[in-house]
Amino acid sequence: MGWKLETGAAVERVTEGSDVLGESPVWCTREQRLYWVDIRAPALRALDPATGHLLQWTLPDLCGAVALAQGPRVLLAMRTGICAFDLDHARAPTPLVQPEPESLGNRLNETRCDRRGRLWTGSMRDYGAATTGALYRITRDLACARVLRDVTVPNALAWSPDDRTLYFADTPDGRLRAYAFDPDEGTLGAMRVLVERDILPGRPDGAAIDADGCLWSARYEGGCVARITPDGRIDRVIAIPATRVTACTLGGADLRTLYVTTARQKLSQAELAAQPHAGALFALHVSTPGLPEPRFTGLV
Protein backbone atom coordinates (compact mmCIF):
# COMPACT_ATOMS: atom_id res chain seq x y z
CA MET A 1 0.00 0.00 0.00
CA GLY A 2 2.88 2.37 0.75
CA TRP A 3 1.03 4.62 3.20
CA LYS A 4 -0.47 4.44 6.69
CA LEU A 5 -3.74 5.95 7.88
CA GLU A 6 -3.07 8.50 10.64
CA THR A 7 -5.74 8.17 13.29
CA GLY A 8 -4.07 10.18 16.03
CA ALA A 9 -3.99 13.59 14.33
CA ALA A 10 -5.62 16.45 16.24
CA VAL A 11 -8.77 16.88 14.17
CA GLU A 12 -11.11 19.47 15.70
CA ARG A 13 -14.83 19.72 15.10
CA VAL A 14 -15.40 23.41 14.33
CA THR A 15 -19.19 23.68 13.94
CA GLU A 16 -21.97 22.46 16.19
CA GLY A 17 -24.46 22.10 13.35
CA SER A 18 -24.31 19.48 10.64
CA ASP A 19 -24.55 20.18 6.91
CA VAL A 20 -26.54 17.85 4.72
CA LEU A 21 -23.92 18.30 2.01
CA GLY A 22 -21.16 20.67 3.12
CA GLU A 23 -18.94 21.71 0.21
CA SER A 24 -16.61 24.26 -1.38
CA PRO A 25 -14.70 25.77 1.58
CA VAL A 26 -12.69 28.85 0.58
CA TRP A 27 -10.54 31.04 2.82
CA CYS A 28 -10.66 34.82 2.35
CA THR A 29 -7.31 36.29 3.44
CA ARG A 30 -8.69 39.83 3.32
CA GLU A 31 -11.53 39.14 5.75
CA GLN A 32 -9.84 36.25 7.61
CA ARG A 33 -13.07 34.35 7.10
CA LEU A 34 -14.00 30.91 5.83
CA TYR A 35 -16.87 30.51 3.37
CA TRP A 36 -18.58 27.28 2.39
CA VAL A 37 -21.99 26.03 1.24
CA ASP A 38 -24.50 23.40 2.20
CA ILE A 39 -25.71 22.39 -1.25
CA ARG A 40 -28.91 20.82 0.05
CA ALA A 41 -29.99 23.37 2.70
CA PRO A 42 -29.36 25.39 0.52
CA ALA A 43 -27.21 27.92 2.36
CA LEU A 44 -24.02 29.95 2.29
CA ARG A 45 -22.06 29.97 5.54
CA ALA A 46 -19.18 32.13 6.78
CA LEU A 47 -17.05 31.58 9.88
CA ASP A 48 -14.73 33.99 11.68
CA PRO A 49 -12.42 31.55 13.51
CA ALA A 50 -11.00 34.31 15.73
CA THR A 51 -14.39 34.97 17.34
CA GLY A 52 -16.30 31.80 16.45
CA HIS A 53 -19.01 33.98 14.89
CA LEU A 54 -20.99 32.13 12.21
CA LEU A 55 -23.00 33.91 9.51
CA GLN A 56 -25.56 32.11 7.37
CA TRP A 57 -27.58 33.08 4.31
CA THR A 58 -30.48 30.98 3.07
CA LEU A 59 -30.40 30.60 -0.71
CA PRO A 60 -33.33 30.14 -3.12
CA ASP A 61 -32.05 27.03 -4.92
CA LEU A 62 -29.33 24.38 -4.85
CA CYS A 63 -25.88 25.96 -4.61
CA GLY A 64 -22.86 23.88 -5.58
CA ALA A 65 -20.01 26.21 -4.62
CA VAL A 66 -18.83 29.65 -3.55
CA ALA A 67 -15.91 31.61 -5.05
CA LEU A 68 -14.36 34.94 -4.11
CA ALA A 69 -15.00 38.09 -6.14
CA GLN A 70 -14.22 41.80 -5.88
CA GLY A 71 -15.72 44.04 -3.22
CA PRO A 72 -18.31 42.79 -0.73
CA ARG A 73 -19.47 40.06 -3.11
CA VAL A 74 -18.97 36.38 -3.74
CA LEU A 75 -19.90 34.23 -6.70
CA LEU A 76 -22.33 31.37 -6.20
CA ALA A 77 -22.62 28.36 -8.48
CA MET A 78 -26.38 28.06 -8.30
CA ARG A 79 -28.26 25.19 -9.88
CA THR A 80 -28.66 26.83 -13.29
CA GLY A 81 -25.86 29.41 -13.44
CA ILE A 82 -23.23 31.62 -11.86
CA CYS A 83 -24.63 34.43 -9.72
CA ALA A 84 -23.18 37.37 -7.82
CA PHE A 85 -24.20 37.70 -4.17
CA ASP A 86 -23.85 40.90 -2.16
CA LEU A 87 -22.84 39.94 1.37
CA ASP A 88 -23.63 43.35 2.84
CA HIS A 89 -27.19 43.62 1.60
CA ALA A 90 -28.14 39.93 1.22
CA ARG A 91 -30.44 40.49 -1.72
CA ALA A 92 -31.33 37.60 -4.01
CA PRO A 93 -28.37 36.30 -6.03
CA THR A 94 -27.91 38.20 -9.31
CA PRO A 95 -27.60 35.92 -12.39
CA LEU A 96 -24.42 36.51 -14.41
CA VAL A 97 -23.87 33.63 -16.82
CA GLN A 98 -25.61 30.34 -17.58
CA PRO A 99 -23.13 27.83 -19.04
CA GLU A 100 -25.82 25.35 -20.10
CA PRO A 101 -29.52 25.45 -20.99
CA GLU A 102 -31.72 24.52 -18.05
CA SER A 103 -33.41 21.94 -20.27
CA LEU A 104 -30.25 19.79 -20.09
CA GLY A 105 -31.19 18.99 -16.49
CA ASN A 106 -27.77 19.55 -14.92
CA ARG A 107 -26.70 21.64 -11.94
CA LEU A 108 -23.40 23.39 -11.24
CA ASN A 109 -20.94 21.82 -8.81
CA GLU A 110 -17.18 22.34 -8.36
CA THR A 111 -16.31 26.00 -9.03
CA ARG A 112 -13.03 27.85 -8.51
CA CYS A 113 -10.95 30.80 -9.76
CA ASP A 114 -7.52 30.44 -11.32
CA ARG A 115 -4.74 32.95 -10.60
CA ARG A 116 -5.49 34.95 -13.74
CA GLY A 117 -8.93 35.70 -12.34
CA ARG A 118 -10.92 33.35 -14.58
CA LEU A 119 -13.72 31.26 -13.12
CA TRP A 120 -13.95 27.52 -13.73
CA THR A 121 -17.17 25.62 -13.08
CA GLY A 122 -18.29 22.05 -13.61
CA SER A 123 -21.80 20.78 -14.29
CA MET A 124 -23.41 17.45 -13.43
CA ARG A 125 -26.72 15.65 -13.23
CA ASP A 126 -27.76 15.80 -9.58
CA TYR A 127 -26.44 12.85 -7.55
CA GLY A 128 -24.23 11.90 -10.52
CA ALA A 129 -27.16 10.22 -12.23
CA ALA A 130 -25.77 10.55 -15.78
CA THR A 131 -22.60 11.46 -17.66
CA THR A 132 -24.02 14.72 -19.00
CA GLY A 133 -21.71 17.22 -17.30
CA ALA A 134 -18.82 19.36 -18.47
CA LEU A 135 -16.10 21.72 -17.27
CA TYR A 136 -16.32 25.39 -18.30
CA ARG A 137 -13.98 28.39 -18.27
CA ILE A 138 -15.51 31.84 -17.73
CA THR A 139 -13.47 34.97 -18.43
CA ARG A 140 -13.82 38.35 -16.71
CA ASP A 141 -16.14 39.54 -19.51
CA LEU A 142 -18.37 36.50 -18.79
CA ALA A 143 -17.46 34.68 -22.00
CA CYS A 144 -17.99 30.97 -21.36
CA ALA A 145 -16.23 28.08 -23.11
CA ARG A 146 -16.52 24.34 -22.58
CA VAL A 147 -13.15 22.75 -21.79
CA LEU A 148 -14.08 19.13 -20.96
CA ARG A 149 -17.19 17.14 -21.79
CA ASP A 150 -18.74 13.79 -20.74
CA VAL A 151 -18.25 14.47 -17.03
CA THR A 152 -20.30 12.75 -14.33
CA VAL A 153 -19.30 14.54 -11.08
CA PRO A 154 -16.69 17.33 -11.53
CA ASN A 155 -14.39 17.82 -8.56
CA ALA A 156 -10.82 18.45 -7.29
CA LEU A 157 -10.14 21.65 -9.24
CA ALA A 158 -6.74 23.06 -8.21
CA TRP A 159 -3.66 24.60 -9.83
CA SER A 160 -0.01 23.97 -9.11
CA PRO A 161 1.90 26.94 -7.62
CA ASP A 162 3.61 27.60 -10.98
CA ASP A 163 0.23 27.51 -12.79
CA ARG A 164 1.49 24.85 -15.20
CA THR A 165 -0.75 22.04 -13.96
CA LEU A 166 -4.50 21.87 -13.48
CA TYR A 167 -5.79 19.08 -11.25
CA PHE A 168 -9.24 17.61 -11.78
CA ALA A 169 -11.29 14.53 -10.93
CA ASP A 170 -14.51 13.02 -12.20
CA THR A 171 -15.40 11.45 -8.86
CA PRO A 172 -16.98 8.14 -10.02
CA ASP A 173 -13.98 7.56 -12.30
CA GLY A 174 -11.80 7.45 -9.19
CA ARG A 175 -8.62 8.90 -10.69
CA LEU A 176 -6.93 12.18 -9.84
CA ARG A 177 -5.90 13.77 -13.13
CA ALA A 178 -3.17 16.31 -13.85
CA TYR A 179 -3.43 18.35 -17.07
CA ALA A 180 -0.72 20.48 -18.60
CA PHE A 181 -2.05 24.03 -18.28
CA ASP A 182 -1.33 27.23 -20.22
CA PRO A 183 -1.99 30.03 -17.72
CA ASP A 184 -2.02 32.74 -20.40
CA GLU A 185 -4.62 31.09 -22.60
CA GLY A 186 -6.40 29.07 -19.92
CA THR A 187 -6.18 25.91 -22.02
CA LEU A 188 -5.50 22.28 -21.17
CA GLY A 189 -2.79 20.09 -22.69
CA ALA A 190 -1.79 16.49 -22.12
CA MET A 191 -3.32 14.60 -19.20
CA ARG A 192 -1.46 12.27 -16.85
CA VAL A 193 -2.90 10.29 -13.96
CA LEU A 194 -1.64 11.64 -10.65
CA VAL A 195 -3.24 8.85 -8.58
CA GLU A 196 -5.01 5.82 -10.00
CA ARG A 197 -8.37 4.66 -8.71
CA ASP A 198 -8.46 2.36 -5.66
CA ILE A 199 -5.04 3.49 -4.42
CA LEU A 200 -6.64 5.55 -1.65
CA PRO A 201 -9.83 5.00 0.37
CA GLY A 202 -13.03 6.31 -1.14
CA ARG A 203 -13.20 8.53 -4.20
CA PRO A 204 -11.69 11.96 -4.94
CA ASP A 205 -13.92 14.90 -4.10
CA GLY A 206 -12.69 18.46 -3.45
CA ALA A 207 -8.99 19.36 -3.23
CA ALA A 208 -6.55 22.04 -2.08
CA ILE A 209 -2.98 22.87 -3.06
CA ASP A 210 -0.21 23.86 -0.66
CA ALA A 211 2.92 25.96 -1.10
CA ASP A 212 5.02 22.86 -1.85
CA GLY A 213 2.71 21.98 -4.72
CA CYS A 214 1.19 19.01 -2.90
CA LEU A 215 -2.48 18.27 -3.40
CA TRP A 216 -4.77 17.61 -0.43
CA SER A 217 -7.56 15.31 -1.62
CA ALA A 218 -10.86 14.93 0.27
CA ARG A 219 -11.90 11.28 0.04
CA TYR A 220 -15.67 10.80 -0.25
CA GLU A 221 -16.76 7.56 1.44
CA GLY A 222 -13.13 7.15 2.51
CA GLY A 223 -13.24 9.02 5.83
CA CYS A 224 -9.93 10.78 5.28
CA VAL A 225 -7.89 13.46 3.52
CA ALA A 226 -4.70 12.58 1.65
CA ARG A 227 -1.66 14.71 0.80
CA ILE A 228 -0.16 13.81 -2.56
CA THR A 229 3.14 15.09 -3.96
CA PRO A 230 3.36 16.49 -7.51
CA ASP A 231 4.81 13.19 -8.73
CA GLY A 232 1.91 11.19 -7.30
CA ARG A 233 3.45 9.87 -4.09
CA ILE A 234 1.09 9.49 -1.14
CA ASP A 235 2.67 11.59 1.62
CA ARG A 236 0.02 11.51 4.36
CA VAL A 237 -3.47 10.07 4.88
CA ILE A 238 -5.33 11.53 7.88
CA ALA A 239 -8.55 10.07 9.27
CA ILE A 240 -11.60 12.34 9.57
CA PRO A 241 -14.48 11.27 11.88
CA ALA A 242 -17.02 11.12 9.04
CA THR A 243 -16.99 8.88 6.00
CA ARG A 244 -18.36 11.39 3.48
CA VAL A 245 -15.46 13.85 3.31
CA THR A 246 -16.34 16.35 0.60
CA ALA A 247 -13.76 19.13 0.28
CA CYS A 248 -10.89 20.96 1.96
CA THR A 249 -9.00 24.23 1.89
CA LEU A 250 -6.02 25.77 3.68
CA GLY A 251 -6.77 28.85 5.75
CA GLY A 252 -6.23 30.58 9.05
CA ALA A 253 -3.92 33.52 9.70
CA ASP A 254 -0.86 31.53 8.57
CA LEU A 255 -2.72 29.38 5.99
CA ARG A 256 -1.72 26.28 7.96
CA THR A 257 -5.22 25.21 9.04
CA LEU A 258 -6.77 22.55 6.82
CA TYR A 259 -10.54 23.03 6.92
CA VAL A 260 -12.55 19.98 5.87
CA THR A 261 -16.25 19.80 4.99
CA THR A 262 -18.32 16.64 5.26
CA ALA A 263 -21.82 15.38 4.45
CA ARG A 264 -24.57 13.30 6.01
CA GLN A 265 -26.88 12.99 3.01
CA LYS A 266 -28.24 9.46 2.38
CA LEU A 267 -26.66 8.00 5.52
CA SER A 268 -28.85 5.42 7.24
CA GLN A 269 -29.94 5.82 10.86
CA ALA A 270 -27.34 3.24 11.86
CA GLU A 271 -24.63 5.09 9.96
CA LEU A 272 -25.63 8.40 11.53
CA ALA A 273 -25.50 6.82 14.96
CA ALA A 274 -21.99 5.56 14.22
CA GLN A 275 -20.95 8.96 12.82
CA PRO A 276 -22.56 11.56 15.08
CA HIS A 277 -20.39 14.33 13.62
CA ALA A 278 -21.16 13.60 9.97
CA GLY A 279 -21.86 16.89 8.19
CA ALA A 280 -19.65 18.95 10.52
CA LEU A 281 -16.81 21.25 9.54
CA PHE A 282 -13.44 20.01 10.81
CA ALA A 283 -10.00 21.60 11.11
CA LEU A 284 -6.46 20.38 11.67
CA HIS A 285 -3.05 22.04 11.73
CA VAL A 286 -0.54 21.20 9.00
CA SER A 287 3.09 22.24 8.61
CA THR A 288 3.08 23.49 5.01
CA PRO A 289 0.92 26.57 4.35
CA GLY A 290 -1.54 26.98 1.57
CA LEU A 291 -1.72 29.73 -1.03
CA PRO A 292 -4.13 32.68 -1.08
CA GLU A 293 -7.42 31.87 -2.82
CA PRO A 294 -7.70 33.78 -6.12
CA ARG A 295 -10.61 36.09 -6.89
CA PHE A 296 -12.70 36.52 -10.00
CA THR A 297 -11.46 39.68 -11.72
CA GLY A 298 -14.74 40.55 -13.43
CA LEU A 299 -17.49 42.62 -11.79
CA VAL A 300 -15.10 45.48 -10.99
Image (cartoon, grey):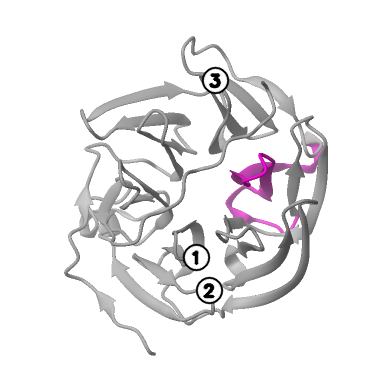
Q: Which residue is mark 3?
A: 71
Asked which secondary structure carries label 1, the reply is: loop
Q: Amino acid at mark 3?
A: Gly
Mark 1 / mark 2, whichever is N-terminal = 1
Q: Position of residue 284 (x, y in %)?
A: 25, 55
- Tell me if 249 is positioned left or right of 100 in this view: left
Residue at horizontal 51 percent and vertical 24 percent from the top = 59
Crowding at dot 2, Cα within 10 Å, few <14 / some 14-19 / many 20+, comes out as some
As measured in the structure, the alpha-carbon distance from the residue carrying label 3 to the one carrying label 2 is: 34 Å
Q: Nearer the viewer, residue 70 or 56?
A: 70
Asked which secondary structure carries label 3, the reply is: loop
In the displayed orientation, state which residue is furthest to the bottom.
Answer: 1
Examine the rendered structure and indicate whether residue 182 appears above or below residue 45: below
Q: Nearer the viewer, residue 188 or 55?
A: 188
Q: Which residue is mark 1?
A: 213
Mark 1 near mark 2, Cβ–Cβ under 8 Å?
yes
Q: Is residue 128 magenta?
A: yes
Residue at horizontal 28 percent and vertical 77 percent from the top = 5
Q: Which residues are magenta?
A: 103-132
Q: Position of residue 133 (x, y in %)?
A: 73, 53
Residue at horizontal 65 percent and vertical 42 percent from the top = 108
- The quadrant where residue 294 appears: top right
Q: Amino acid at mark 2?
A: Pro
The label on residue 127 is none
Mark 1 / mark 3, whichever is N-terminal = 3
Q: Position of residue 48 (x, y in %)?
A: 29, 30
- Tell me if 37 is positioned left or right of 179 in this view: left
The label on residue 230 is 2
As measured in the structure, the alpha-carbon distance from the residue carrying label 1 to the one carrying label 3 is: 29 Å
Asked which secondary structure carries label 2, the reply is: loop
